[in-house]
Amino acid sequence: MSNQATLSRPVSKVDPFSHAFLHDPYPYHEALREAGPVVWLEQYGIWTMARHEQVRDALTDFQTYCSSAGVGLSDFRKEPPWRPPSIILEADPPLHTRTRAVLTRILSPAAIRVLRVTFDREAERLIDRLVEKREFDGVAELAEAYPLKVFPDAVGISEEGRENLLPYGSMVFNSFGPRNELFNQAMENAGPVRDWIMSKCSRAVLAPGGLGMQIFDAVDAGELSEAEAGMLVRSFLSAGIDTTVYGLGNALYCLASHPEQWKILRENPNLIRGAFEEVLRYEAPVQTFFRTTTRPIDVGGVRLGEGEKVLLFLAAANRDPRRWERPDTFDVRRRAAGHMTFGTGIHGCVGQAVARLETEAILTALASRVASLELAGEPKRRLNNTLRGFDILPLRLVTA
Ligand code: 8QM
């Protein structure tokens, strides 16, 4: 019975990290979903899941699908990681439980309410400037500029050297994929960029009261070692910038290219929160994550072995017609909760409230000032082994 299933395992020859795939992943997502609940990718010798049910089940079962062997293609048990593993992302319980508890507290709803004041003010300031400008690049001048200001300020790092944050993010997110051209390009200046990041992770250089220093408060409370606290500051600087940059860029793109949806938002600003969830479902800034099996497991009648890499297609789960009506329609009124872009389970995005806060601040400032939000030229994609988003997004704002 299980032999038969093994013989009939669905296989695919696609390369999910090729330029063709990354440029327009959606037809490939459909093919992978339709191929079966789990599919063998011949090119890499790994499994992949693209249906909502299987992606969610794998993310929920952290005992079978572990993170400590890395959440990229590379198996940390077979080859050395490019940097010391994250003690939250690339960790399992009990280590993960302890580190996660600290970040959950620092990013609690009460903490987000405190951040909201500054985040709203900075969003209004920036949008006022851009409204005056009328035409601008939505990536450099908005989707990058805003997170690069408010998040490092909140963490409490110096202004000097912040141009290292995006190159570091590019290293982190490209490194989850294979060692292809995108990976090599991202790693070109790896040494100095990594050194700068690490130099910003110590108690001595963090502003008092900031999110970074609050991690060090947990050392004083006996929850972490001094070295672990530095590693969790590194996690903030790894996970907190590119994700929101790509998410905000995708939000601007979705709304600029769906004017009727922008009109709905302008007339009902209470829909902004749900609209961002729909952006995350429809154009997921984080497309994929891997897990590694800790034991043999049956998935829809197919037997996976122990120690095997599994590529989870968050972005394909988000458009699975088994889960969503009209999955390829961008609809800000839809209930998009249940998308997989923040993951789910014990590793579900710990910073998701910050991501929502940033995008809501920007979209609210825009909706109160701007009648139409238009593409002013052809957007250009920036390819990345994990992230989906833009390099250039020419925008035009027309005031009410
Ligand atoms: C991705 O370094 C880290 O801890 C880390 C890096 C990247 C992420 C999360 C954590 C999911 C956003």
Image: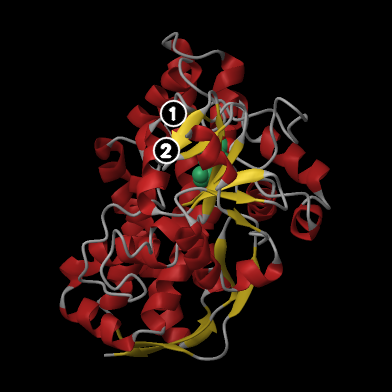
Height in image: 179 above or below 306? below
Q: Is mark 1 within 8 Å of ligand 1?
A: no
Q: CA distance from mark 2 to mark 1?
A: 6 Å
Question: Looking at the picture, how far across and down is residue 1, in whole percent?
Answer: 47, 34
Furthest residue to the top? 222
Is residue 302 in view from this perspective? yes
Does residue 400 appear left or right of residue 23 in this picture? left
Residue at mark 1: 62
Quarter holding residue 11? bottom right
Provide the secondary structure element on which disc 1 rests. Answer: loop
Q: Which of 164/38 is in front? A: 38
Residue at 51% from the left image edge and 66% from the top image edge: 31
Residue at 35% from the left image edge and 48% from the top image edge: 53
Q: Dot 1: within a 10 Å radius of its alpha carbon, few (fewer than 14), some, or many (20 or more) residues?
A: some
Question: Looking at the picture, how far across and down is residue 243, in whole percent?
Answer: 51, 54
Does residue 153 appear left or right of residue 200 in this picture? left
Mark 2 near mark 1, Cβ–Cβ under 8 Å? yes
Residue at mark 2: 59
Question: Looking at the picture, how far across and down is residue 298, in whole percent?
Answer: 45, 34
Q: Dot 2: within a 10 Å radius of its alpha carbon, few (fewer than 14), some, or many (20 or more) residues?
A: many
Residue at 61% from the left image edge and 18% from the top image edge: 227
- Figure quadrant of the C terminus: bottom left
Quarter holding residue 337? bottom left
Provide the secondary structure element on which disc 2 rests. Answer: helix
Does residue 281 appear left or right of residue 367 in this picture? right
